[in-house]
Image (cartoon, rainbow, N blue to C red):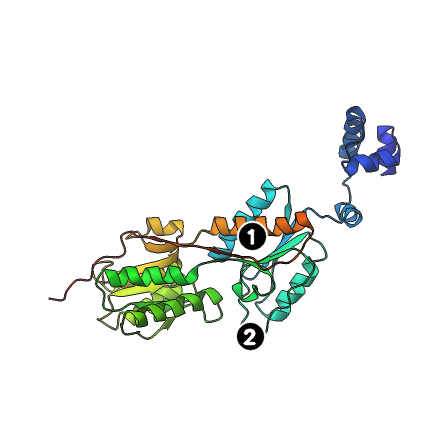
Amino acid sequence: MQDVARLAGVSAQTVSRVAREEGTVRPETTRRVREAMRQLGYAPNRAAQALRSGAFNTVGVIGHKLARTGEAHIIDAVTTALRDEGFGILLVDAPSNSAVDFTRALNSLSQAVDGVVVLRLETPSATPVQLPDGIPLVVGDFRYTDRHTAVGTDQTNGARDAVHHLLGLGHETVHHIAGPSSSVQARAREQAWIATLWEEGRAVPPLVRGDWSPRSGYEAGRRLLEDPDVTAVFCANDEVAIGLIRAMHERGRRVPRDVSVVGFDGLSLGEYSFPPLTTVRQDFRRAGEEMVRLVLEQVDSGAAGGERQILIPTELVVRGSTAPRRERT
């Protein structure tokens, strides 16, 4: 800082005021100081400034397997919304989805950010993650709504819409390729599938378990093809559905002439699959924007916590992968 002060011909205190962007330094002096900073490669210590002011202008985002489709879409929305509000983002991909790793990541983030957005806490056990108190926090998991503000998608009604759509086309029942059992979202879709079939008095076929990937849909499809009575399949997500459709084509089962397929998520790739995929669209952008809005409300008010719940509806998008059931000849 002293070198900058000498080059700009000002005091160290003036350099400090310019670095803190206090707005009390004359424009011409500010210009000279910033030019000296540029020439000397001086960068203000933002962490030290944050400690003095109590604000980092940064929000932490934590999750696991952030490259997954849903997380990637939400992170994009969160990043855009934070940038529009003048905040940076500190992103942490927990090494596992264990309660221990999530708790460690949360505790470390809470010391360096103004607030935290927690994506899906798909922990493999019932052990609750100890989310920190006293910091603005929003979670994407409704298991924590007794203590924290949460934003989520209406998985239940989305799955019900998919099953009702297929039953409405005349299919006697609907098979399901589910997501991993550790996923809260996958279990919600699975339970809604079962409940809807029961309510409609239909048989519940054996569940086929997948892992969100196209490969798991492809492999599940090869198994389902062993049953000639399969005419309708609801998939846990669009990528699983794409894998299933490929398996059907390879075995000569035409979609939707022989088998109707519905995905979940509403990814753009579904518009260009063959045939175009009927799906349940999640509004990832709105989810990310709501998370940012709610966490910044807490930051601005200085009142961390709350138990607000935002449940975002889904939308059934009907395309070419579903059709009325054909009678056998």
Name the quarter where the N terminus is drawn: top right
Q: Which residue is mark 2?
A: 126
Residue depicted at x 35% and y 55%: 279
Residue depicted at x 36% and y 64%: 217
Indicate the secondary structure of the residue bearing disc 2. loop
Q: Label 2 is placed on what type of residue?
A: Ala
Name the quarter where the C terminus is drawn: bottom left
Q: Nearer the viewer, residue 44 or 52?
A: 52
Which quadrant holds residue 128? bottom right
Q: Position of residue 11 (x, y in %)?
A: 89, 33
Q: Position of residue 47 (x, y in %)?
A: 76, 49
Which quadrant holds residue 246? bottom left
Residue depicted at x 28% and y 59%: 165
Viewer can see residue 240:
no
Q: Position of residue 233 (x, y in %)?
A: 30, 65
| Residue 83: image tag | none
Q: Label 1 is placed on what type of residue?
A: Met
Q: Which residue is mark 1?
A: 291
**Mark 1: few/some/many CA within 10 Å (<14, 14-19, 20+):** many
